[in-house]
Image: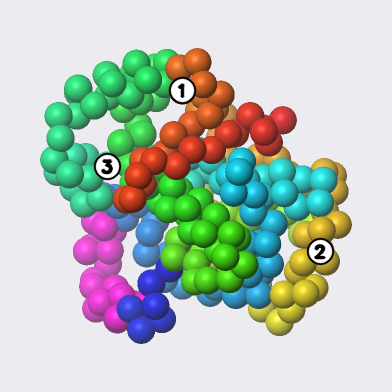
Amino acid sequence: MPPSNDFQELRGIWAQWDDDAKQLFYQNYGDLPYLLDIKVDRHLLRAMVQFWNPAYSCFTFGEVDLVPTLEEYTTLLRCLKIQGNKAYVRPTNLPTFVKKLMMITGMSEQWAAARNTPVPTILAETFRSLSACRRAGDGRFIGCAQLLLVWFHSHFWKIDKVHCRVFFKDYSPLKEAAATPRRDDITEERWIEILQNLREEDVMWKAPWMTPSEILYRCGSFDWVPLSGILGVVGYTPLLFLR
């Protein structure tokens, strides 16, 4: 999460663009601009960190184990495929990269070709930051807090009583999140109490806007998924929480 002054500068730049330029950005880079309008609930974020398990790279809220998946973050950002000559990725031999990804994961060519996005790096650095904050008992979270909080709220639609609805093809979870006002006056202590007492029936295991798709839960013979981050590789184990 950039400092607030950086966010103000980014908002100012975005506001200067005309509609054509904004639409071109959405087409090339997904729904990233909506993150500029999502307010960070620092009380909730600090409470969530206390329930992060660095050993297994997942949250344990009461009876519930949850963690953002590659597929969920990809759907949130709606950056299904980023070309090699665009931002986020260094120029590389994409066909060779895709073949290597297929060999490592055992997934289809179609699946591998759609995963050339910044999501693994975003997720890896999110996990790394959560683990660092949890081990230190404090510290500054340097992942994308807005994205993490949108993901969190997406799994609690049962509580909000609005989980029964149809999501159309071009639905944008981030766009709706940016337009949805949320309370920010709940204290960290109250959030901790809420998260400690979560039950399985309170949570949707799959975000309601997720379309049926293959879930990467292992690489080769290993029941874990490596994520390539800025400072190295971080792993997580979707089998712990996928029901």
Q: Which of 114 and 107 is in front in this view?
A: 107
Which residue was labeled with disc 3?
82
Q: Position of residue 179 (x, y in %)?
A: 54, 69
Q: Does the magenta stretch include residue 14?
A: yes
Overall secondary structure of the magenta stretch? helix
Which residue was labeled with disc 1?
219
Instruction: Please report the residue visible at 64 percent of the width from the left and 49 percent of the height from the top.
Output: 53
Q: Residue 4 lies in what quarter of the image?
A: bottom left
Q: Residue 69 lies in what quarter of the image?
A: top right
Q: Distance between the residues labelled 3 and 2?
A: 38 Å
Which residue was labeled with disc 2?
194
Instruction: From the image, state whether disc 1 or disc 2 is nearer to you.
Output: 1
Dots 1, 2 in contact, CB < 8 A: no
In the depicted structure, whether residue 45 falls above or below residue 131: below
- Tell me which amino acid carries mark 1: Cys
The stretch of residues the image draws in magenta is 7-25
- Tell me which amino acid carries mark 3: Ile
Instruction: Please report the residue visible at 49 percent of the width from the left and 71 percent of the height from the top.
Output: 140
Q: Position of residue 40 (x, y in %)?
A: 55, 73
